Amino acid sequence: MPRTRSLIVMADGERGDGTIVGTITLVGPGSPLVEVAQGDEFELRMLAVSPLERGRGIGATLTKAALEMARERGATRVVLSTMESMHTAHRLYERMGFQRREDLDWVVVDNLDGTTTRVAAGEGSRRCRPPVGLRLDPLTPTALTSPGCTRALPGAGRH
């Protein structure tokens, strides 16, 4: 059975044996961790860089490594989602060739029974709540979208 998830970690030090400074997860088709990927698309998840280490190109290095791993595993398309408030991440993804796909935007809706449901951004109601870490008025669901992005991988087969 193919691996459905790979974690890439970056550490300081000449041999990578120092403090961990960042991480990203690559999710393959069929993984229960998929949020926006469809069919045979791979998905980037949980890019994180230590606040003390930001501005050193670590996010770009991790993203490039994940894209290369996806390509090696036969990916022809990679998608991701990000919170609207993450402007620095948006610039990174745009520089790397990702393009916004509004059809992948989504929000989380609180259900009356205490569960939550993910719905397309345009289907949100006054019960929408922001993704974790985003503090916005819960009555403005248009401000709660998570831009979904996609990138075709150069050198990969046609999708």
Image (cartoon, rainbow, N blue to C red):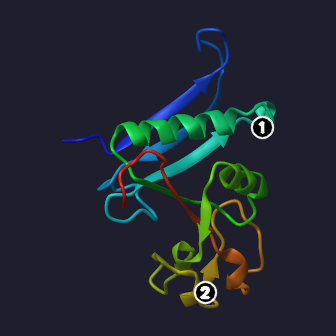
Residue 101, quarter of the rendered image? bottom right
- Give the residue number, with chain letter if any, for mark 2: 127
The three-letter amino acid code for the residue at tag 1 is: Pro
Left or right: 157 in relation to 19? left
The residue drawn where x is 34% and y is 56% is 32
The percent position of residue 38, horizontal first and vertical second, equals 37, 65
Q: Is residue 87 above or below residue 84?
A: above
The percent position of residue 116, horizontal first and vertical second, equals 48, 75
Looking at the rendered structure, the secondary structure element under dot 2 is loop
Work out whether residue 134 or residue 5 is closer to the camera in this orientation and state it. Answer: 5
The residue drawn where x is 60% and y is 45% is 47
> Which of the two discs, 1 and 2, sits closer to the camera?
1
| On-image quarter of the N terminus | top left
Work out whether residue 111 or residue 141 is closer to the camera in this orientation and state it. Answer: 141
Work out whether residue 115 or residue 31 is closer to the camera in this orientation and state it. Answer: 31
The residue drawn where x is 46% and y is 53% is 43
Work out whether residue 54 or residue 109 is closer to the camera in this orientation and state it. Answer: 54
The residue drawn where x is 58% and y is 81% is 121
The percent position of residue 88, horizontal first and vertical second, equals 77, 52
- Give the residue number, with chain letter if any, for mark 1: 51
The percent position of residue 123, horizontal first and vertical second, equals 54, 89
Q: Answer yes or no: is residue 10 visible.
A: yes
Q: Is residue 155 above or below residue 14?
A: below
Q: Answer yes or no: is residue 23 visible.
A: no
Farthest left residue in view: 1
